Amino acid sequence: MKTDKRRVPAGAAVLRDDITTAIRRAVTQELAEVGYGRLSIEAVARRAGVSKTAIYRRWRSKLELVLDMVSAVAGRKLPMVDAGSLRGDVELLLLVAAGALRHPLASQIIPDLLAEAARNPQIAETLQRALAGYQDRVGELVIGRAVERGELPAGADRRGAADLIVGPVYWRLAISRTPLDTPEIARMAAAIVAALRVACTGPSLDEPAVWDTRSLTASEPHRAGA
């Protein structure tokens, strides 16, 4: 039986995967070394061992190249096994996140891109999309499992919970840049789980508190005629 084989049209460029991989690796290294502002196609090509033409066949500009890198990293599958409990899942996620944030490349690239996002709407939009996707995956894996086990109610705010889980470790390692060892991660996980249970099952917070600026403490909401 004869089978049809698709052929690349005559004159079309064949984009080799190994060259694409080399370019992506090079842009990551360059971005960590010099930042987005000083990043150049020439330097990426030199580090990757390819011509500038090879890069421009794939991406039209350094902005497009960096946005593609961010999207590719954000789209990676979250490596999470089921630890059997909410606390176990949270602790495992914190260990994974801490390992990623401690990586020399991530520790240089993330702050630089966040700073650049304040000046570049396209980078800001791509980062927001990437973070929203990460929130959704954390919510699906960690909070979804907790709901299935009966550890959290079905109406739990998954994105809000993802912020509560990842926020502390990001603050420590990416913002304040202070060490975070494994025993402390375990304690952090326990505190986060306690906070999640209160946030997801506690009393309604729909009615905002009224702040007494004289004492800088929150008071009970004012009642009519009080």
Image: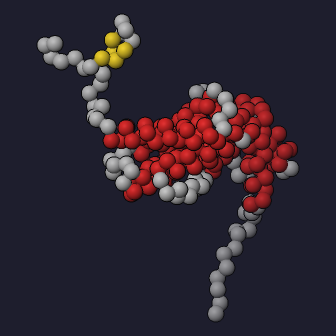
Percent from the top left, x then y, of residue 216? 39, 12
Q: Is residue 139 visible?
A: yes
Residue shown at the point (69%, 48%) measured from the top left: 59
Using the image, determine if residue 37 lies above or below residue 19: above
Residue shown at the point (78%, 46%) measured from the top left: 26
Quadrant position of residue 207: top left
Residue shown at the point (49%, 45%) measured from the top left: 135
Taking depth in this image into account, of 68 and 136 the one nearest to the observer is 136
| Number of numbered discs overlaid on the protein picture | 0
Percent from the top left, x then y, of residue 46? 86, 44
Using the image, determine if residue 197 lies above or below residue 177: below
The way the protein has been coloured in the rendering is secondary structure
Percent from the top left, x then y, of residue 109? 69, 36
Q: Give the farthest residue toward the left.
A: 225
Percent from the top left, x then y, of residue 188? 54, 37
Quadrant position of residue 94: top right
Residue shown at the point (70%, 68%) measured from the top left: 9
Q: Is residue 204 left or right of residue 138?
A: left
Q: Is residue 30 left or right of residue 148?
A: right
* Quadrant where the image shows the C terminus: top left
Q: Is residue 124 visible?
A: no
Taking depth in this image into account, of 34 and 2 the one nearest to the observer is 34
Q: Give the farthest residue toward the top.
A: 214
Quadrant position of residue 12: bottom right
Taking depth in this image into account, of 29 and 60 the one nearest to the observer is 29
* Quadrant where the image shows the N terminus: bottom right
Q: Is residue 101 left or right of residue 90?
A: right
